[in-house]
Image (cartoon, rainbow, N blue to C red):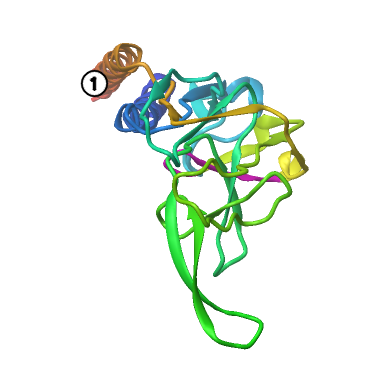
Amino acid sequence: MNQSFYTAAVGAREQMLRLNVQGNNIANVNTYGYKVEKPAFQTLMYGMIRGTEDDVPRGTGAKLSGTTTDFSNGIMMDTGRAQDYAIQGEGFFALYEPETGEITYTRDGSFSLSMYQEPDENGTLQEVFYLSDGEGRQVLDTQGYPIVVTDPEARQPVGTFVFVYQDGLRHAGGGRFTAEGKSAEVWIGDAKVVQGFLEGSNADLATEISKVIEAQRSYSYALKMVQTSDEIETTVNNLRN
């Protein structure tokens, strides 16, 4: 099969994956604290690896090698809600999952109160309210402990946490991240936390739509190249006959 066929086929497939990335950014334009992802491509020939699948020869075009996250700050919006928080500068809020013990990190400070029944010193169950993300994950304070709320209108000691290397953070859904590899080492930050504000998504709708159009054009050109390559192969076969 003509090498151009493989190059075009790989290109079409990778542009479809690129569309998934841009589509996810568009879907999260209104998600508080969301950080936009940017696709990164790698030339297969220089990478000296096989194609995107086992049956695709080495050196056929380029592939989507992964995504990078743009951690630039979004616009701060005044909500007036007592338990909405935004970070000025670098850092993340930490969320603790009581059932699994997992800790994830987010810039989305749209918090609420979650009620739990816990025993007191005498073993009697009592209602305890924790600051949470609305899905049962508890917000950690400046010392790394879940925040117990006694006054729902009062400012809570919400902590911020920083990483030496942010490029190891991985999206865990919405605006949350997990720390992996070299980013697993986390420190308590000192960024200013503003009450009554939320940080908007840093995804720009106009930019993302233009990227979608660009990917669609690239996809259509790749398919045209597949068609042309197939026509050339058919012509060559007919001449042999």
Task: Residue at 73%, 34% (x, y): give it.
Answer: 189
Quarter of the figure with residue 231:
top left
Left or right relative to 39: residue 58: right
Query: Looking at this view, is 113 or 53 the one in front?
Result: 113
Task: Residue at 38%, 24% (x, y): give it.
Answer: 78
Q: Residue furthest bottom?
A: 123
Query: Looking at this view, is 218 or 134 the one in front?
Result: 134
How far across and down, in percent of the image, does residue 166 sit? 67, 31
Task: Residue at 65%, 48% (x, y): give it.
Answer: 141
Q: Which residues are magenta?
A: 172-180
Query: Looking at this view, is 61 or 228 the one in front?
Result: 61
Depicted 35 relative to depicted 156: above or below: above
How far across and down, in percent of the image, does residue 241 sit? 23, 25
Task: Residue at 34%, 15% (x, y): give it.
Answer: 211
**Amino acid type of the residue that numbered disc 1 sits on in the rendered structure:** Gln
Is 177 in the magenta? Answer: yes
What secondary structure is found at the residue carrying circle 1? helix
Q: Which residue is labeled 1 in the image?
A: 227
